[in-house]
Amino acid sequence: MDGLASQPLWQNELRVAIEAATDAGNLIRSGFSVRTKDVEDKKNTSDLVTETDVKSEEVVFSRLRAAFPTHVLIGEESSVSAGPGTLTDEPTWMCDPLDGTTNFVHSYPNVCVSIALTVKKQVVVGVVYNPITEELFTATKGSGAFLNGRPIRCSAAQDMKRALLATEIGVTRDEATFHAVFSRISKLVQAMQSVRCTGSCALNLCSVAAGRVDAFYEIGFGGCWDVAAGALIVLEAGGAVIDPSGGPFGLMSRRVLAGAPAIVPQVSAILAGCPTSEHEPPA
């Protein structure tokens, strides 16, 4: 073990994270069916923020500050103006208070709260909660992954032609990025069974962990808050998490490929040969 996994299972931190996610989830649920929501554009009309995003982050941070006043907090909404900052060895919480904002705006039930704790730049606690389906995905480093308290495992898929892929088209709308995004999807779909785009990076990773899809990749998602919790949940479910190019996964890179251990290198071999646009994060 590397020392981090030998801690007392991070149960206190996990408990607080679940409480924070539940509180924020209650807020999301209360606004989910409201037909007219308070919506603003970030970069464009495909990149949205609602009043619920902001309030949800406040709820999560309030819980975390009360329990861990010395810990660093990184949240999607607070990072819009301040930036995500630099990841250090200090205990750092990463939160996406409402992953799947566009889904939320349209009352499409693939939405979640994602909360992760890093220590010495390693994720040690991950919580992803969908308050609409009431699915709670959890993991602590070295202790396995769970859905509503029951252990989950990634799929054992080996044949690309029978593997189900998940990805997202993102929110960047320039022509070069569009071409790069759909070129990757086209090449992979020709090699795989089918593809799903459901609007939440965190929940896509959890779908990998639960064996619902065999691989997921995304290049250019919002930030570390989208991927930190889900990446740990995949690893603890027996999956692989790497950079789409085939190199090591970088928590701050805004690039991820996760899936069944036998499928991930096959997907990365295809992605490594696909171009990225100048507006996408490089390998």
Image (cartoon, rainbow, N blue to C red):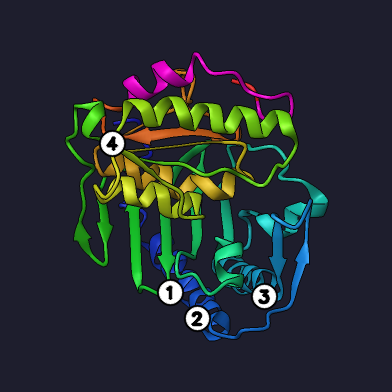
Q: Earlier in the sequence, mark 2 or mark 1?
A: 2
Image height check: is 211 above or below 254?
below
Q: Secondary structure at mark 4?
A: loop
| Structural crowding at the residue carrying mark 2, measured as other residues with C-alpha within 10 Å and reported as few (<14), some (14–19) or many (≥20) | some
In the rendered image, which residue does mark 4 sit on? Answer: 193
Which dot marks residue 55? Answer: 3
**Amino acid type of disc 3?**
Lys
Amino acid at the residue labelled 4: Gln
Q: Amino acid at mark 1?
A: Pro
SS under mark 2: helix
Q: Quarter-wise, where is residue 54 in the image?
A: bottom right
Q: Residue at x 20, y 27 (%)?
A: 159
- Mark nearest the camera among 4 and 2 is 4
The reply, left or right, for residue 174 in relation to residue 109 is right
Q: Which residue is mark 2?
A: 29
Give the crowd class for mark 1: few <14, some 14-19, many >=20 residues within 10 Å: many
Of the two numbered discs 2 and 3 on the same chain, state the one appearing first in sequence: 2
Q: Magenta segment range?
A: 264-281
Q: Is residue 172 left or right of residue 124?
A: right
Q: Are marks 2 and 1 in contact (CB under 8 Å)?
A: yes
Which is in the foreground here, disc 3 or disc 4?
4
Judging from the image, what secondary structure is the residue with disc 1 in? Answer: loop
Which label was assigned to residue 264?
none
Cα–Cα span, label 3 and label 4? 40 Å
* Amino acid type, mark 2: Arg
In front of the other: label 3 or label 1? 1
Mark 4–mark 1 Cα distance, whole angstroms, equals: 30 Å
Instruction: For mark 3, give the secondary structure.
Output: helix
| Relative image position of residue 25 (x, y in whole percent) | 49, 75
